[in-house]
Image (cartoon, helix red, strand yellow):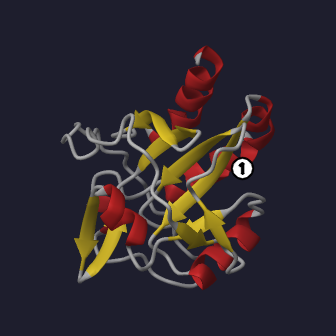
Amino acid sequence: MSVKHKFHILENDGASDHLENSSIPSISLPNQDGNFLRLDRSDTFRMILYFFPMTGRPDMPLPEKWNTIPGASGCTLETCNFRDNYDVLIGLNAIPIGISTQSVDYNKEMTMRLGITFDVLSDENLDLKNTLRLPTFSIKDKIYLKRLTLIIEKKIVKKVFYPIYPVNKHIQDIIKWLKEN
């Protein structure tokens, strides 16, 4: 039995307006292998931090009414789009990094299953969410990040994509922006 995913049209609620031109804080988050990655970097490449609520797992049910929450579904598709366009992004001097409130072990299972070769970080303790005041929603006391993307250059947020709709075309918006900037 297949589940139909409906992509809801999202309106900008202003929850990310404060992020453009802000500085990335001195925070390190664990990747899918448990290794900490520092986010306030002065590398020559740009970082694409894409925040997502959660990816589903074949062996676990989605949270109750997940597919009725605007912007919740489509995280696996989004991550696969970053995977499938990895070489294009690297060619544009940018590296994708996924971030969610899922655990390190949850991210490890997902990256292995989907063949993700880049870092997917866990903000399970909500350190980055709280510091940057990122938009969220919750289900039964579990906090999920709303989908948004930040393009970081030398520790500064240069571009904010929020809200993201439709999720299946988001990677093309990022590529277009990187080519023009």
Question: Splitting the image into 4 quarters, where does residue 9 fall?
Answer: top left
At 48% from the left and 42% from the top, the residue drawn is 150
Q: Nearer the viewer, residue 12 or 27?
A: 27
Whether residue 41 appears in this view of the structure is yes
* Label 1 packing within 10 angstroms: few (<14), some (14-19), many (20+): some
Question: Splitting the image into 4 quarters, where does residue 45 fall?
Answer: top right
Q: Nearer the viewer, residue 59 or 145?
A: 145
At 29% from the left and 44% from the top, the residue drawn is 16
Spot the residue most to the left: 13
Please state the total of marks drawn on the protein image.
1
Residue 138 x %, y %: 25, 71
Residue 7 x %, y %: 37, 45
In the image, residue 15 above or below residue 159: below
Image quarter of the C terminus? top right
Q: Nearer the viewer, residue 143 or 126?
A: 126
Question: Splitting the image into 4 quarters, where does residue 121 fall?
Answer: bottom right
Tell me the SS state at disc 1.
helix
Image side of residue 76 versus residue 163, left or right: right
Residue 85 x %, y %: 73, 39
Image side of residue 59 versus residue 156, left or right: right
Residue 54 x %, y %: 47, 67
In the image, residue 57 above or below residue 105: above
Q: Nearer the viewer, residue 176 or 126?
A: 126
Whether residue 145 appears in this view of the structure is no
At 43% from the left and 45% from the top, the residue drawn is 23
- Amino acid beneath label 1: Arg
Q: Which residue is mark 1?
A: 83
Image side of residue 151 versus residue 85, left or right: left
